[in-house]
């Protein structure tokens, strides 16, 4: 039961303006509802956002990553190095191509893959690197691309959470090798479901288009041919219209999230949670788009499980999430030989992390309310003392 009289605060909610809703209605009435003019405009605006690089839209971030790997030539016998601290689709798509995912542990300070370990994990079979920017915080991009160049490796960036993030003033997506974005409903910019692939050149863009729709080309005999095994990954114009409405606000969305993250840090300072040793994200207000704000519970000092903590938050009218359990401990990956103890930082973080509400429609009072609830629960269930 909700103990408060305040409305339930979910951990995420998309902000979609009235103009976008009207725009969707217009598309529905236009006579062209699947991939068409809205997608063309969406891709053009995304390309402009990414410094003019070629961009192709897809119906999910998962599809973009899989096709990105295929365009990079990843297949059976190859190894792709990534992190176990991500949404499971990152490594599932590596398996889809027939390649082998190789995990390296995270740096507990950033919760992103540790680039020292990444370098050590490179073998003659390594074909590509797949970094993930958890909660929108990029890895050290200079170092990443130095490693890739030195070892002649492709990079398929899982920037699913990093639309709006930057590296030293440059937008994620505006440089690098192949970059994959997701526009899932929970992401900073959404098409409800969807994604986009940023590519290096027109040849890759043509390949992306073929993989996106059954390998069809408009040349060849009878004006149509199919010369590779593609899938069905195109985005509808209804979804693209939602994306166009979202792109107008991307800078404001990022600013607002950074501001709310700052309020979180201020409100948590010296409170019961901080005293108990709750873990906080890296304080980065220049590069990260603050896609999420995750705390790590000090479970050895709390007389409760994470599920009980989340239930206590819910009783106080606050939604939370888990992003993510370390994925190498999922059944599919255990069956491939992964087990506890292999990536201790990811395992510890994955077992203790809780995602707090952070979205553009929140107020500073909402943040204060969340922090009050966390502090109260820590006060009540924490084992303080020396
Ligand atoms: C959301 C997400 C994906 C997958 O995107 P979908 O659009 O849901 O397929 C992949 N990786 C990460 C890190 C994500 O957050």
Image (cartoon, rainbow, N blue to C red):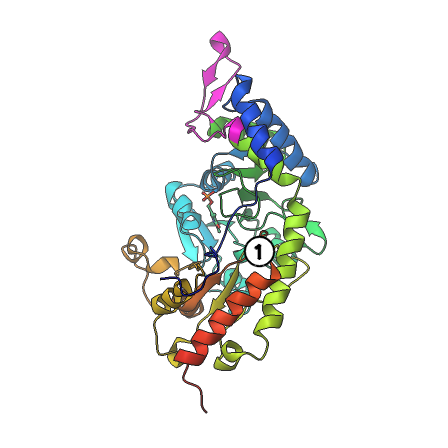
Considering every residue shown, the one lying at the far top of the view is 222
Considering every residue shown, the one lying at the far front of the view is 5
- Magenta region: 213-238
Is the CB atom of the residue marked by disc 1 within 8 angstroms of ligand 1's nearest atom?
Answer: no
> Which residue is at a point 43% across and 58% down the rendered structure image?
321
Please give the count of numbered marks on the rendered protein.
1
Would you say 328 lies left or right of 217 here?
A: left
> Which residue is at a point 32% across and 57% down the rendered structure image?
330
Query: Which residue, given by chain and number where applicable, does mark 1 sit on?
Result: 362
**Quadrant, the N terminus:** bottom left
Q: Position of residue 160 (x, y in %)?
A: 52, 47
Q: Secondary structure at mark 1?
A: loop
- Considering only vertical position in the picture, is 370 above or below 301? above
- Residue 107 shows in the view: no
Would you say 255 lies left or right of 352 here?
A: right
Is 227 a magenta residue?
yes
Q: Position of residue 103 (x, y in %)?
A: 43, 58
- Considering only vertical position in the picture, is 34 above or below 101? above
Is 288 a magenta residue?
no
Judging depth in this view, the residue of 66 and 117 nearest the camera is: 66
């Amino acid at each position: 039961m909700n103990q408060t009289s305040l409305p339930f605060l979910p951990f995420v909610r998309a902000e979609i303006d009235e103009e976008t809703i009207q725009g969707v209605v217009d598309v529905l009435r236009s006579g062209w509802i699947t991939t068409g003019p809205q997608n063309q405009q969406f891709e053009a605006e995304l390309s402009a956002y990414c410094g003019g690089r070629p961009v192709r839209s897809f119906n999910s971030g998962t599809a973009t990553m899989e096709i990105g790997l295929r365009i990079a030539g990843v297949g059976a016998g190859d190894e792709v190095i990534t992190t176990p601290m991500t949404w499971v689709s990152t490594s599932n798509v590596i398996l889809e191509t027939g390649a082998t995912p190789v995990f390296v542990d995270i740096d507990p300070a950033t919760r992103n893959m540790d680039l020292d370990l990444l370098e050590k994990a490179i073998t003659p079979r390594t074909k590509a690197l797949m970094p993930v920017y958890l909660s929108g915080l990029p890895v050290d991009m200079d170092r990443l691309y130095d490693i890739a160049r030195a070892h002649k490796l492709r990079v398929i960036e899982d920037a699913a959470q990093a639309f709006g993030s930057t590296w030293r003033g440059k937008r994620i997506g505006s440089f690098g090798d192949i970059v994959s974005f997701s526009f899932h409903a929970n992401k900073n910019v959404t098409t409800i479901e969807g994604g986009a692939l940023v590519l290096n050149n027109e040849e890759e863009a043509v390949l992306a288009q073929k993989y996106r729709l059954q390998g069809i080309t408009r040349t060849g005999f009878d004006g149509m041919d199919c010369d590779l095994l593609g899938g069905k990954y195109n985005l509808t114009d209804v979804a693209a219209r939602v994306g166009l409405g979202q792109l107008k606000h991307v800078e404001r969305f990022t600013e607002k999230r950074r501001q709310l993250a700052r309020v979180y840090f201020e409100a948590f300072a010296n409170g019961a949670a901080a005293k108990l040793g709750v873990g906080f994200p890296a304080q980065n207000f220049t590069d990260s788009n603050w896609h999420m704000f995750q705390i790590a519970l000090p479970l050895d000092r709390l007389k409760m499980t994470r599920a009980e903590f989340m239930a206590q938050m819910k009783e106080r009218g606050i939604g939370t999430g888990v992003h993510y359990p370390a994925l190498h401990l999922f059944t599919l990956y255990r069956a491939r030989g992964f087990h506890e103890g292999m990536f201790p930082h990811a395992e510890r973080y994955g077992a203790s992390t809780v995602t707090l509400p952070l979205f553009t429609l929140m107020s500073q009072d909402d943040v204060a309310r969340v922090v009050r609830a966390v502090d109260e629960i820590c006060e009540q269930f924490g084992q303080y003392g020396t």
